[in-house]
Image: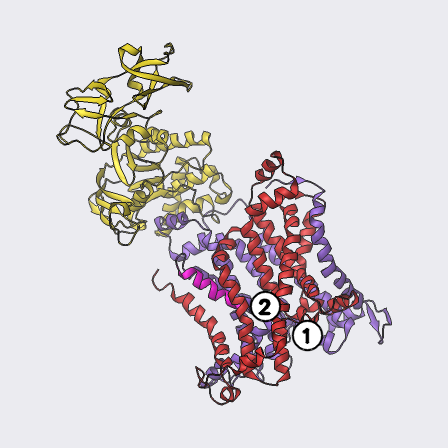
Chain colours: A purple, B yellow, C red
Amino acid sequence: MERKVNQKAWFLVLPVVLIVCFSALIPLMTVVNYAFQDTFGGNEFFWAGLVWFEDILNSSRFHDALWRQFLFSGLILLIEIPLGVVVALSMPRRGLGVPICLVLMALPLLIPWNVVGTIWQIFGRVDIGLLGWAVNSLGISYNYTTDPLSAWVTVVLMDVWHWTSLVVLLAYAGLRSIPEAYYQAARIDGASRWAVFRHIQLPKIRRVLVIAILLRFMDSFMIYTEPFVVTGGGPGSATSFLSVDLVKIAIGQFDLGRAAAMSIIYFLIILALSWVFYTVMTAKRRDDMEVGQ
Amino acid sequence: MARIELKNLAHSYLDRPRDEADYALKEMTHVWEDGGAYALLGPSGCGKTTLLNIISGLLVPTQGQVLFDGRDMTREPPEARNIAQVFQFPVIYDSMSVYDNLAFPLRNRKFQATEVDRRVREVAEMLDLTDRLKRRAENLTADMKQKISLGRGLVRPDVNAILFDEPLTVIDPHMKWLLRGQLKQLHKDFNHTMVYVTHDQTEALTFADKVVVMYEGEVVQIGTPEELFEKPAHTFVGYFIGSPGMNVLDCRLEGRQAWLGEHKLDLLAGHHVPAALGDKVQLGIRPEFVTVTRPEEGLPARLERVDDVGRYRIARLTLNDQAVAAILPEGSELPSDTAGVRFEPSHLHVYMDGHLSEGGA
Amino acid sequence: MKGRWLIPTIYIILLMIPIYWLVNMSFKTNQEILSVLSPIPLNPTLDNYLVIFTDASWYSGYINSTIYVVMNMIISVSVALPAAYAFSRYRFLGDKHLFFWLLTNRMAPPAVFALPFFQLYSSVGLFDTHIAVALAHCLFNVPLAVWILEGFMSGVPKEIDETAYIDGYSFPKFFVKIFMPQIASGIGVAAFFCFMFSWVELLLARTLTSVNAKPIAATMTRTVSASGLDWGVLAAAGVLTIIPGALVIYFVRNYIAKGFALGRV
């Protein structure tokens, strides 16, 4: 849409700017402030320069947490996006089934995050949880409080349970906006089910998929409450993702400088990665194409 | 290319249709000749798209058969019927180039690559798309996109029929004429059976050899544009085709005389008067065949107003409380408020319950 | 396609099993929970719920959560509306940067902000108030609301604005009387998302409150730690915190798909 130049539009944006400044910029300044200072207690601070940053960037603890974080986010994207799309594709398009599906599927999205943690804490327990009991009675050793692999499986399963529905809802909305004529034309052209997906459905839900991937990436990268409730980051530090580790340092050890430096690095990583995702997925495609690919 | 036969065809969108009103398409039997250009004309919701989708196989009719060259196709899926369909809004595969769009139906049917290439280039040539083959289909104008969807149908070697569902809706007016001309040319060159759905009478009359007029789920007349004009089989056809539409006047029949109030009209020998009259008896006459006279020379009428529509003027009159339109010949003087009208008897039609009363019917 | 309903059905069943297990446990005594694994409570009891309902901190937990969620919804949507209008209709100095900057706030990990928030709100005397949580949640809800609303507004032809000005409407009157009804479904979707993210977020809500504004979900963890490993009460508490969300989805069920399909999200 053609937009007019109008500097007075700033007045319309002002409330948002003020409120976000108050709730984002001032705290962020505090964080930055800590990151460059050190304290011997009390309110005495002195300039520490980049010491904290070097410290963090060289610590193996940070590297481990970062690696775990990437593994986790990568895994859940690999599972949730295809699974969400498959479920959305097979959902009914009209009738009574639609609201039933939507209500039941959206339910996990509206459960407070610590309750999600509690549900899985109970569900996965070997002694009183259905999942833990069932897996063990199948002869597979599973205990998320002692075994790192079990803990990982539990946390990933929990996230898939919790968030796949968001992908389903977005993809379903995208699919619904495809006019019926496209499917009819594809039938007349003799397209296979796969060709319909590849050449009609996928291009049409591209936009919502970008949003879904971005949202899921950002939120999974920031995950804190759910794994904290279930595993507390353990066993050991097997499920200590970046946020969990950060809170441990900041509140557990009250190591504000290090925590602040880590926050900034953490934030910058998310920013950079989101930008890359966004640019790659929305890149303007060339108009000329190879023929007969 | 094929001859299309519809046998006792009817369709309802309900699972268990109970009466006439439940049917979107009322029972019909028709034959559409091989190589003909047919237009399905009618107002929105008259069932023309339903009929089209039954022919293309997107819908399975509730009852009856669809035959292509005598072969029963009623239950065949669309991909087995070898028909091409162009929809109201351009359907193209956004992520593909124009070339790949055209090649798509052939590749789905596992044609040889060289054969695909030959056919795609041939069709592109036909539709003036050659210089755009490498372009991404997404960024083309609406008329180009419609050509691509047409091309996807033409590219197949064994097309039985090409179906159009109001294909010019989203095209700019000046492009409409161009595209319609190209369609006509294509029909002349290749002689495909074409079925063209539209609610625009100009489009239908200029495109088709035979116009199929539909009204409330029924085919009310199939005929050449002249036949529709000269002898509308239904008052709806008379009213829908022509500008302004046919005058339809309620009347009483007594023997071979029609009464409009206390005014009497003698019918000709050619007019058929059935033994049992319908509930509603009407006379129909096109405004082209109504002459405005001085009061004493015709049936007395009151002139309401005169509309000037450019090429000619239309006199709006009331005769016995019923509206009558008449086209005034060029250069004729304006009649006064009280005037008379005369109907040309050979173009006067008698309708029983909407249908033309014809001899032997 | 035949058997197409199978996938959603299986998916929904899998979603429901953990919730079913929670509900199942909430009606059992601790003794039963720890001794046998039964698919239905053998001695159904309401004791766990009684424990919760006799504790006054539970009502206040519900009320507190509702207050700050509603406050947040109102603040987020009402500041986002004019901003989204500006982004969808005008170009101005720094508009693109501003939009991206807003979105980056959606990417800020709450864990990073927990401590600074605590200090900020303590220093301005807002600690343990509803407005503190509502403002903190604006951090991620305002950018989201602007984003969603901008998508919906761009879909409204700007001829509508122009016609209204020609007809002599002032900007505020035009905005409220003519423009807002046009994007009603967008406002609904934005409000739904604000509700959702404010309702489920706990890290900030718990950091910024102690007694007076403590959210329901935080009350739950407290009740549990007070009674040790009281699984039955924990499960009952979990069930009770699911209910409000379930009610909200039930009421907006018909708008979810419709609203989703229209706008950007």
User: Regarding mark 2 in the picture, which secondary structure is present there?
Assistant: helix
Task: Where is residue C40? Give x, y as percent.
Answer: 43, 82
Q: Residues within 10 Å of mark 2 (few under 14, many from 20)?
A: many
Q: Which mark is residue A73?
A: 2
Q: Is residue C78 above or below residue B204?
A: below
- What percent of the width, then of the height, locates residue A282? 58, 52
Taking B345 as reference, is A247 above or below it?
below
Residue C255 appears left or right of C150:
left
Residues at marks 1 and 2, CA–CA distance in whole angstroms = 16 Å
Q: What residue is drawn where x is 45% and y is 31%?
A: B173
Instruction: Please provide percent x and percent y for residue B154.
Output: 35, 41
Q: Residue at x 80, y 70 (%)?
A: A51
Label 1 SS: helix
Residue designated by label 1: A245
Q: Are marks 1 and 2 in contact (CB under 8 Å)?
A: no
Q: Amino acid at mark 1?
A: Asp
Residue A80 visible in this rendered orientation of the protein: no
Quarter of the image for residue C102 reads: bottom right
- Magenta region, residue range: A95-108
